[in-house]
Amino acid sequence: MAEVPEPESDEEEPETDGGVRAYTVRLELVDEPGELLRALEPISANGGNLLSIHHERGNITPRGHIPVEVDLESPPERFDGIVDALRDAGINVIQAGEEHYGEELSVVLVGDLVETDLSETLSRIEDEADAVVKDLSLAAPDGTDATASARLRLAIDSGRTERLFETIRAIGTDKELTVVEPLVGGEA
């Protein structure tokens, strides 16, 4: 009977304990050929496994770049290296990892939301207030050319509520939107 050789001891065994975790990385890319590929290379080179890519080519951030959301798997100890490699490659990392926010609030915007570019409004809220839009509900009973309302559920760091509302009020003024804020101390 032939003996099966044992694997060499200096070979690293594949991880089988489920030690990988899912992460989301939000990037801003310049609208040039090859930029998406350039952004993905540091992820794979540093042990990340791509799960999905949401490339919003038709949407532009306030800085004139394209937002890209990348979902990936990685062992936790490698994730910071992936983010560092992205930044070292000159990729603008907007958000990385499992962001934990201390507060979630809901606000309602009313007005010509579609005509005033809802996507740009959401990007401004996220960029200027360091918030994350967790959920969006849009109602446009008379069509997108008429008055619509949007309920936004936003996540922010604790202690940044007033900054969030100042930002949303300023955006509302710029775009002639009515902002309905939650009652302080009440449920959002």
Image (tube, grey):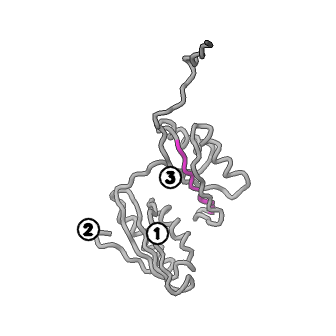
Marks 2 and 1 in Cβ contact (< 8 Å)? no
- Residue marked by disc 2: 185
Q: CA distance from mark 2 to mark 1?
A: 22 Å
User: Residue at left 56%, top 18%?
Assistant: 10
> Is disc 2 placed on a helix, strand or loop?
loop
Q: Amino acid at mark 1?
A: Leu
Q: Which mark is residue 136?
A: 1
Q: Amino acid at mark 3?
A: Gln
Q: CA distance from mark 1 to mark 3?
A: 19 Å
Q: Nearer the viewer, mark 2 or mark 1?
A: 1
Residue stretch rendered in magenta on the structure: 64-73
* Towards the viewer: 46 or 130: 46
Q: Position of residue 64 (x, y in %)?
A: 63, 63
Q: Residues within 10 Å of mark 2 (few under 14, many from 20)?
A: few
Q: Quadrant of the N terminus?
A: top right
User: Residue at left 57%, top 74%?
Assistant: 117
